[in-house]
Image (spheres, rainbow, N blue to C red):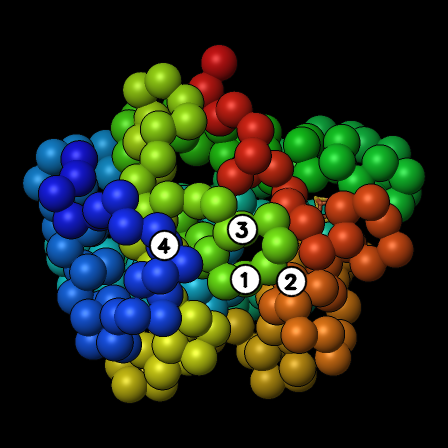
């Protein structure tokens, strides 16, 4: 892969492509990857707006495409409820959760370690158990300072392709797609959140940066949990 993805800088394409061109491009990327990887292509679903958009796009490519959700003991009740609805609607979506004991305030004392245990580790389990060779994410390059340098198709781990089919979409275009296709979203958006995560580490902000409400007051502020930055295969 991939004839669809090009070497043209993504920052240029973000502004040059129309909404419909982006949708077509995302579908083409997914179709191309699915024809190559089949059931080894799996969508990672964080239950945020970007993930449900990617899931909807993937299902347009093939209803057979599977997915996984990584949840934690700290997810807000609204996200848990939304997750249950999603799994009921799509039994081919598996849920992974690390139940091992951790210090109660680890998220405050060492959020990197907390995310490593509760998010990165179960993501590795999912990739291993589901035989994933191509994982699909809802990552977008305009989400914040940590997401500007990704590509639509990446090979970070040996034997594991990463596909970011909506990398070029702006926040507004995600909402446009979801509205036009009547896709249900996590009810936390109605409360004013723009980026969703675990309850202790996610706040509503007025900042321009979409991910500014994540890990406020820590060195991770506006940053990453680690699934996009750390190795996922040993
Ligand atoms: S987002 Fe916060 S609570 Fe959730 S795993 Fe990371 S540090 Fe822990």
Counting from the top left corner in percent of width and height, residue 234 is at 48, 14
- SS label for mark 1: loop
Q: What crowding class fits label 1: few (fewer than 14 Cα within 10 Å), some (14-19), or many (20 or more)?
A: many
Counting from the top left corner in percent of width and height, residue 69 is at 47, 48
Q: Are marks 3 and 2 in contact (CB under 8 Å)?
A: yes
- SS label for mark 2: loop
Please give the name of the residue rendered at 52% of the width and 39% of the height, measured from the top-left corner: 228
Return the disc, 3 or 4, that comes first in the chain's sequence: 4
From the viewer's perspective, is residue 7 above or below residue 17? above
* Residue receiving disc 2: 211
Q: Are marks 3 and 1 in contact (CB under 8 Å)?
A: yes
* Residue receiving disc 1: 143
Tell us which disc is closer to us: 3 or 2.
3
From the viewer's perspective, is residue 26 above or below residue 69? below
Return the disc, 4 or 1, that comes first in the chain's sequence: 4
Tell us which disc is closer to us: 2 or 4.
4
Tell us which disc is closer to us: 3 or 4.
4
């Amino acid at each position: 892969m991939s004839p669809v993805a090009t070497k043209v800088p993504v920052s240029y394409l973000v502004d040059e492509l129309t909404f419909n061109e982006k949708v077509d491009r995302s579908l083409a990327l997914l179709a191309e990857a699915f024809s190559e990887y089949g059931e080894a292509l799996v969508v990672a679903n964080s239950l945020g707006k970007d993930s449900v958009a990617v899931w909807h796009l993937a299902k347009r490519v093939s209803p057979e495409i599977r997915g996984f959700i990584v949840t934690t003991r700290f997810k807000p009740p609204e996200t848990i409820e939304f997750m249950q609805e999603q799994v009921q609607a799509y039994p081919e979506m598996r849920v992974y959760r690390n139940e091992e004991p951790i210090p109660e305030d680890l998220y405050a004392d060492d959020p990197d370690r907390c995310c490593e245990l509760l998010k990165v580790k179960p993501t590795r389990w999912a990739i291993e158990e589901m035989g994933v060779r191509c994982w699909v994410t809802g990552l977008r390059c305009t989400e914040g300072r940590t997401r500007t340098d990704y590509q639509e198709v990446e090979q970070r781990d040996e034997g594991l392709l990463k596909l970011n089919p909506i990398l070029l979409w702006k926040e507004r275009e995600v909402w446009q797609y979801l509205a036009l296709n009547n896709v249900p979203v996590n009810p936390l958006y109605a409360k004013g959140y723009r980026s969703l995560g675990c309850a202790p580490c996610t706040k509503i902000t007025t900042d321009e940066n979409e991910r500014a409400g994540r890990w406020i007051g820590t060195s991770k502020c506006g940053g990453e949990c680690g699934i996009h930055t750390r190795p996922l295969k040993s």
